[in-house]
Image (cartoon, rainbow, N blue to C red):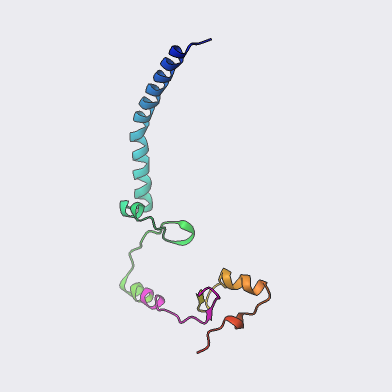
Protein backbone atom coordinates (compact mmCIF):
# COMPACT_ATOMS: atom_id res chain seq x y z
CA UNK A 1 0.00 0.00 0.00
CA UNK A 2 1.24 3.48 -0.86
CA UNK A 3 1.86 6.01 1.82
CA UNK A 4 0.67 9.61 1.88
CA UNK A 5 3.97 11.05 0.61
CA UNK A 6 3.96 8.80 -2.46
CA UNK A 7 0.33 9.66 -3.25
CA UNK A 8 1.05 13.39 -2.93
CA UNK A 9 4.00 12.96 -5.31
CA UNK A 10 1.73 11.23 -7.82
CA UNK A 11 -0.82 14.03 -7.48
CA UNK A 12 1.84 16.66 -8.21
CA UNK A 13 3.07 14.69 -11.21
CA UNK A 14 -0.47 14.33 -12.61
CA UNK A 15 -1.24 18.02 -12.05
CA UNK A 16 1.93 18.94 -13.94
CA UNK A 17 0.90 16.61 -16.80
CA UNK A 18 -2.59 18.17 -16.86
CA UNK A 19 -1.08 21.67 -17.05
CA UNK A 20 1.16 20.64 -19.95
CA UNK A 21 -1.75 19.06 -21.85
CA UNK A 22 -3.88 22.16 -21.32
CA UNK A 23 -1.09 24.40 -22.61
CA UNK A 24 -0.65 22.24 -25.73
CA UNK A 25 -4.36 22.13 -26.53
CA UNK A 26 -5.04 25.80 -25.75
CA UNK A 27 -3.71 27.21 -29.04
CA UNK A 28 -5.50 24.56 -31.10
CA UNK A 29 -8.77 25.26 -29.29
CA UNK A 30 -8.45 29.03 -29.82
CA UNK A 31 -7.80 28.49 -33.54
CA UNK A 32 -10.86 26.22 -33.78
CA UNK A 33 -13.05 28.83 -32.07
CA UNK A 34 -11.75 31.61 -34.33
CA UNK A 35 -12.43 29.53 -37.44
CA UNK A 36 -16.01 28.87 -36.32
CA UNK A 37 -16.54 32.53 -35.46
CA UNK A 38 -15.37 33.52 -38.93
CA UNK A 39 -17.50 30.86 -40.64
CA UNK A 40 -20.67 31.96 -38.83
CA UNK A 41 -19.94 35.68 -38.78
CA UNK A 42 -19.79 35.84 -34.98
CA UNK A 43 -18.02 38.82 -33.43
CA UNK A 44 -16.68 39.39 -29.93
CA UNK A 45 -19.56 41.84 -29.46
CA UNK A 46 -22.02 39.01 -30.15
CA UNK A 47 -20.41 36.97 -27.40
CA UNK A 48 -20.31 39.80 -24.87
CA UNK A 49 -23.85 41.02 -25.44
CA UNK A 50 -25.50 38.01 -23.82
CA UNK A 51 -28.41 38.36 -26.24
CA UNK A 52 -29.30 35.58 -28.62
CA UNK A 53 -30.61 36.79 -31.94
CA UNK A 54 -32.59 34.93 -34.54
CA UNK A 55 -34.95 31.98 -34.45
CA UNK A 56 -34.46 29.12 -32.01
CA UNK A 57 -31.34 30.53 -30.41
CA UNK A 58 -29.27 30.79 -33.56
CA UNK A 59 -27.15 33.86 -34.09
CA UNK A 60 -28.26 35.38 -37.36
CA UNK A 61 -25.63 36.86 -39.66
CA UNK A 62 -26.65 40.15 -41.21
CA UNK A 63 -26.97 39.88 -44.97
CA UNK A 64 -26.10 42.67 -47.32
CA UNK A 65 -29.18 43.70 -49.25
CA UNK A 66 -29.81 45.80 -52.30
CA UNK A 67 -31.61 49.15 -51.84
CA UNK A 68 -34.85 47.69 -53.25
CA UNK A 69 -34.83 44.99 -50.59
CA UNK A 70 -34.06 47.54 -47.89
CA UNK A 71 -37.35 49.31 -48.66
CA UNK A 72 -39.18 46.00 -48.39
CA UNK A 73 -37.58 45.43 -44.99
CA UNK A 74 -38.74 48.85 -43.80
CA UNK A 75 -42.27 48.04 -44.89
CA UNK A 76 -42.18 44.70 -43.08
CA UNK A 77 -41.03 46.43 -39.89
CA UNK A 78 -44.25 48.46 -39.63
CA UNK A 79 -45.98 47.99 -36.28
CA UNK A 80 -49.35 46.25 -36.44
CA UNK A 81 -51.95 47.21 -33.83
CA UNK A 82 -52.80 44.53 -31.30
CA UNK A 83 -56.22 42.89 -31.67
CA UNK A 84 -56.05 40.62 -28.62
CA UNK A 85 -54.85 41.21 -25.05
CA UNK A 86 -54.22 38.44 -22.53
CA UNK A 87 -54.91 38.47 -18.80
CA UNK A 88 -51.25 39.29 -18.04
CA UNK A 89 -51.00 42.08 -20.60
CA UNK A 90 -49.74 39.95 -23.49
CA UNK A 91 -50.81 41.17 -26.92
CA UNK A 92 -51.27 39.61 -30.34
CA UNK A 93 -52.02 41.29 -33.66
CA UNK A 94 -54.03 38.35 -34.95
CA UNK A 95 -51.38 37.59 -37.57
CA UNK A 96 -49.18 34.53 -37.72
CA UNK A 97 -49.37 31.58 -35.36
CA UNK A 98 -51.62 31.83 -32.32
CA UNK A 99 -49.41 32.63 -29.32
CA UNK A 100 -49.02 30.03 -26.57
CA UNK A 101 -50.84 32.09 -23.97
CA UNK A 102 -53.95 32.31 -26.17
CA UNK A 103 -53.77 28.68 -27.27
CA UNK A 104 -53.63 27.60 -23.63
CA UNK A 105 -56.67 29.70 -22.74
CA UNK A 106 -58.66 28.39 -25.72
CA UNK A 107 -57.73 24.83 -24.68
CA UNK A 108 -59.23 25.62 -21.25
CA UNK A 109 -62.56 26.41 -22.92
CA UNK A 110 -62.25 30.19 -23.30
CA UNK A 111 -62.87 31.86 -26.66
CA UNK A 112 -60.56 34.06 -28.65
CA UNK A 113 -63.22 36.77 -28.79
CA UNK A 114 -63.09 37.16 -24.99
CA UNK A 115 -59.62 38.65 -25.41
CA UNK A 116 -60.40 40.93 -28.36
CA UNK A 117 -59.42 44.55 -27.77
CA UNK A 118 -62.43 46.84 -28.08
CA UNK A 119 -61.76 50.00 -30.11
Give the side of residue 59 with respect to residue 84, left or right. left
Name of the residue lying farthest toward the right: 109
* Residue at 43% in and 20% down: 11
The image position of residue 105, as x and y in percent, is: 62, 73
Q: In terms of depth relative to the viewer, which is nearer, 103 or 62?
A: 103
* Residue at 43% in and 17% down: 8
Q: Is residue 43 above or below residue 4?
A: below
The image shows a total of numbered marks equal to 0
Location of residue 74 (image quadrant): bottom left
Q: Is residue 105 above or below residue 55?
A: below
Residue 96 is a magenta residue: no
Q: Is residue 108 above or below residue 16?
A: below
Name of the residue lying farthest toward the top: 1
| Magenta region, main secondary structure | loop
* Residue at 50% in and 79% down: 93
Q: In terms of depth relative to the viewer, which is nearer, 71 or 10?
A: 10
Name of the residue lying farthest toward the bottom: 119
The image position of residue 42, as x and y in percent, is: 35, 52
* Residue at 36% in and 72% down: 69
Q: Is residue 80 above or below residue 41?
A: below
Residue 80 is a magenta residue: yes
Give the side of residue 37 with respect to residue 3, left or right. left
Location of residue 15 (image quadrant): top left
Q: In terms of depth relative to the viewer, which is nearer, 87 or 29?
A: 87
Location of residue 9 (image quadrant): top left
Q: Which residues are magenta?
A: 73-89
Amino acid sequence: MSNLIEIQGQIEKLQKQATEIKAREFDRTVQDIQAKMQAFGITVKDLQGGKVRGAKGKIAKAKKTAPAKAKKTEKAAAVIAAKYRGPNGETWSGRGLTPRWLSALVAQGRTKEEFAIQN
